[in-house]
Amino acid sequence: MTGAIKVLGISGSPRRHGNTETLLDAVLDGAREAGGEVEKIVLGSLDYASCRGCNVCHRTGECIINDELTPVYDTIASADVLVVTSPIYSMGITAELKGLIDRTQYIWARKFILKTLYFTNEHTRRHKGIFVSTAGLGWENVFDAAFPAITAFFNTTGFEYWDNVIANDLDHYDGIRGHPTALAEGRAKGRKVVDLLRKMQESGEIETSSREETTPEHATDT
Ligand SMILES: Cc1cc2nc3c(=O)[nH]c(=O)nc-3n(C[C@H](O)[C@H](O)[C@H](O)COP(=O)(O)O)c2cc1C
C-alpha cells in the first residue's frame, strides 16, 4: 500500500522569487511531477523572533515563544521530504534560516536532555532532507560553512541529509536562469526523491507518512 508523499519546501531567502527560491521551485516542480504533495513556506513572509537562549525548553521541552514560526515545526514534523534553502550570505546561511534552526532547540532538548523523543534509524531513513543553496562567487568552498548547520538541523528534526542542490558562480551566470545545469538538476532531484520514497513504500520497506516518537536509547548529539 502506498500513501501521499509530503514534500515541504522552506525558502530561507529574504528575496522573493530570486535565485534560491527559483531553484527551490524547480525541486518542488520535479517532486510534484512525480506525484508528491507539495507545500512551500516562505520564512521572509513570517513574523518571528530569534531564540532567546532562556533554556526553559531544557526543563519543559517547549519553546516559550509563540509566533508565526511556531506552527511551522508541526508542518516539518508531518513532512516526508524537507527541502530547506538559503542563499549564501557572508559565507553562511541567512538570518531567516538560522532563526528557524535555532528555534529547534526545544526538539534538541527533548532528545538529549529530557530524553522524551527519539527517532529510530528506520524513521530517519524514510524522511529525506535536501539543502538548496546559491552563491554569487565561484569559490569551490563557498557552501562549506553552511553544511554543518544544515546537518545539525536535519539531525535534530529526524531527517536523513539526503542531498544538496547547490549552484555557485551566479554573478558570472547573471543569476540562476543563466546557469547551464542547476534548474534541470533541481527538478531531477525533486522527482528522484519522491520516486525513491514511493519505491520504499511499494516494497513494504516503509509505511505511509507517520512519525513515531519513542523513548531514546541510542540518541547521539549533533
Ligand atoms: C547580504 C549578502 C551577502 C552575500 N554574501 C555572499 C558571500 O559571502 N559569498 C557569495 O558567494 N555570495 C554572497 N552573496 C550573493 C548571493 O549568495 C547570491 O546572489 C545568491 O544567489 C542570492 O540568492 P537570492 O536571489 O535567493 O537572494 C551575498 C548577497 C547578499 C545580499
Image (tube, rainbow, N blue to C red):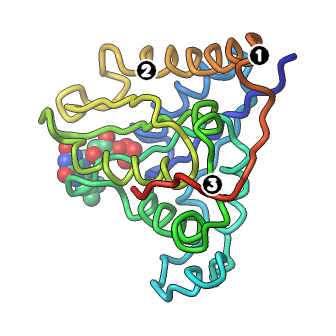
Residue type (three-letter) at the residue carrying disc 3 = Tyr
What residue do we see at 66% from left, 77% from top? 62
Left or right of 188, for residue 214: right
Which labelled disc corresponds to residue 183?
Answer: 2
Q: Residue furthest left?
A: 139
State whether residue 98 is above or below residue 119: below
Quick one: SS at disc 3? loop
Mark 2 to mark 1 CA distance (whole Å): 32 Å
Mark 1 and 3 residues: CB-CB less than 8 Å, in contact?
Answer: no
Residue at which label 1 appears? 204
Residue type (three-letter) at the residue carrying disc 1 = Gly
Mark 2 and 3 residues: CB-CB less than 8 Å, in contact?
Answer: no
State whether residue 218 is above or below residue 188: below
What residue do we see at 51% from left, 37% from top? 160
What residue do we see at 55% from left, 71% from top? 109
Question: Residue 36 location, x and y as percent?
Answer: 72, 24
Q: Residue furthest right?
A: 1
Crowding at label 2, few (<14), some or many (≥20) Cα neighbours within 10 Å? many
**Eye-nearest disc, 2 or 3:** 3
- First in sequence, mark 2 or 3: give its number: 3
- First in sequence, mark 1 or 3: give its number: 3
Mark 1 to mark 3 CA distance (whole Å): 23 Å
- First in sequence, mark 2 or 1: give its number: 2
**Eye-nearest disc, 2 or 1:** 1
Residue type (three-letter) at the residue carrying disc 2 = Leu
Quick one: SS at disc 1? loop
Which labelled disc corresponds to residue 118?
Answer: 3
Mark 2 to mark 3 CA distance (whole Å): 36 Å
